[in-house]
Amino acid sequence: MAPGVHLAVQDTPGQEPATVLLHGLASTHHWWDLVADLLPGRRVLRWDHRSHGQSTIPTGRHTVEDLATDAAAVLDAAGLQQCIVAGHSLGAAVGLRLAADRPDLVAALCCVDGGLFDPQTIFGRSWWDAQPAMRLDRRIAPTESMLTAWALGVGLPAAAVPALLANYQPDPSDPRRVRLRLPAEHEGPLAHSLWSQRPADLLARVDVPVTAVLARTADRAAAAIRRRALRHTLDGAGRTVTERWIDGGHDLPLEQPHQVAAAILDLIEHAALAVPAVVVRMSA
């Protein structure tokens, strides 16, 4: 990719157009394992972003734009165009920027609980206010058994546990414990870059079908804020997207893989028919 950047890429052969799956902050391409298993026969590309997973940790600050540039380089190297791009959380923001900057590479975009929410509406108009929520303190040193118990306790399926554990590596100071693979010094700049991105400006430049797969939380106050943040983006962009609200929390690729995969398959069909994007409001 860029100097000093080498990405760990998984390219599963199959029917094209290729489906590209982009993971979120501090996770890896394994976050999509359960969804990828539900896309049989399709070519699927996914990778660990720089400083994540098995990819290299280059020096300097990283931004959403850098990750989108990496994504374009992967697809260019693979000789691909007009892909179906799906991203979760930070990965959705990366996918949105990729679709805006390189329309030749993206035939349709699926934003899974991220990308389209205006981050300043949700987290605060100043970085001072926003960073405590965007940089949750995950810098404890848990054991794998602690992470497994947490995952099962919040209702994740047992099949999702390996994807969670893939975010961590052995702690050199205590082999009984693990620590996040993403270094703390890179998490902050990435989170700030995400907060700084103006999704309305990017969405206004995207002409392909867009689906928003969104978590329908039981917290009414939080739900109202999320809806307002989405409306802010759509109004600012002057366009509509397909909305699919799904019961669950933020980690929908792990919590509701069947519904996320169904949304991606519907989008593939939608893009093949070349139908202009329309708004579809599911019950919320």
Image (cartoon, helix red, strand yellow):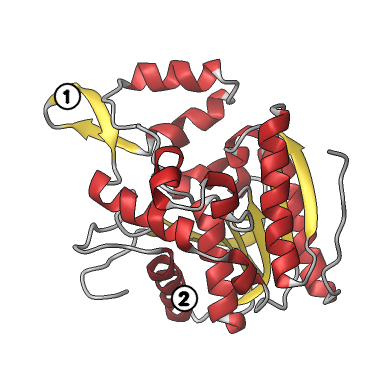
Where residue 84 sits, quadrant-wise, is: bottom right
Considering only vertical position in the picture, is 259 above or below 137?
Answer: below
Q: Position of residue 214 (x, y in %)?
A: 70, 45
Depth check, front residue: 31 or 188: 188
Q: Is residue 37 left or right of residue 273?
A: left
At a point 63% along the width and 50% down the height, the residue shown is: 112
Query: Quadrant of the rendered structure where residue 81 is?
Result: bottom right
Image quarter hosting the N terminus: bottom left
Q: How many marks?
A: 2
CA–CA distance between discs 1 and 2?
Answer: 37 Å
Residue, x 51% and y 47% (percent of image)? 124
Identify which residue is drawn at 71% across, 37% down.
223
User: In the rendered image of this protein, does residue 223 appear above or below residue 242?
Assistant: above
Q: Are marks 1 and 2 in contact (CB under 8 Å)?
A: no
Q: Where is residue 218 drawn, in percent x and y?
A: 72, 27
Q: Residues within 10 Å of mark 1 (few under 14, many from 20)?
A: few
Q: Let me know if residue 210 appears in the view.
A: no
Residue 164 showing in the rendered view = yes
The kind of residue tagged 2 is Ala
Q: Which residue is mark 2?
A: 72
Determine which quarter of the picture holds residue 203.
Answer: bottom right
Q: Residue 186: x percent and y percent?
A: 28, 52
Where is mark 1, residue-wise?
A: 175
The first of marks 1 and 2 along the sequence is 2
**Front in this rendered view, residue 183 or 133:** 133
Tell me which residue sits at (60%, 72%) in the image: 202
Q: Seen in the image, is 169 located left or right of residue 276? A: left
Tell me if residue 214 comes above or below residue 91 in the rendering.
above
Label 2 environment density (alpha carbons within 10 Å; few <14, some 14–19, many ≥20): many
Q: Report the side of 231 relative to 168 (left or right).
A: right
19 vs 131, nearest the viewer = 131
